[in-house]
Image (cartoon, rainbow, N blue to C red):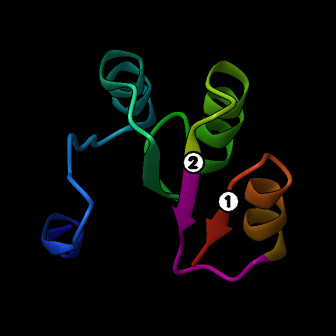
Amino acid sequence: MAEIEEADGMELVGEASSGEEAIRLVEEILPDIIVLDVVMPEPNGVELTRILSERFPDLGIVALSAYGENEFVFGVLSLCARGMF
């Protein structure tokens, strides 16, 4: 995540190692955007996207994945993620 820390106008305000931890951090910090990995411990990135989209409709969500399977891509994008790379 060093690239985010070095980007103009961006500040890394937290890191989570699981979906549960990510939810707690979003509730606490209220960031503008989160970057998540689709494959992560519970809840996984697809489910995390659903939960956060419902609770924080203005939150920008960018999902990253090394997998190109349609279930991941369409699952995350159908849940309002702003982009998947």
The kind of secondary structure element at disc 1 is loop
In the image, residue 25 above or below residue 16: above
- What residue does disc 2 label? 60
Q: Quadrant of residue 25?
A: top left
In the rendered structure, which amino acid carries the disc numbered 1? Arg
Of residue 62 and residue 22, the one placed in the foreground of this image is 62
Describe the element under mark 2 as helix, strand or loop: strand
Q: Nearer the viewer, residue 71 or 1?
A: 1
Q: Is residue 85 visible?
A: yes
User: Magenta stretch: residue 83 in it?
Assistant: no
Question: Is residue 59 rendered to the left or right of residue 16?
Answer: right
Which residues are drawn in magenta? 61-69
In the rendered image, which quarter contains the N terminus? bottom left
Q: Which residue is mark 1?
A: 82
Q: Is residue 32 left or right of residue 6?
A: right
How crowded pointer 1 is (Cα within 10 Å; few <14, some 14-19, many 20+) is rated as: some
Location of the C terminus (image quadrant): bottom right
Q: Kindly identify the amino acid type of the residue bearing the numbered disc 2.
A: Gly
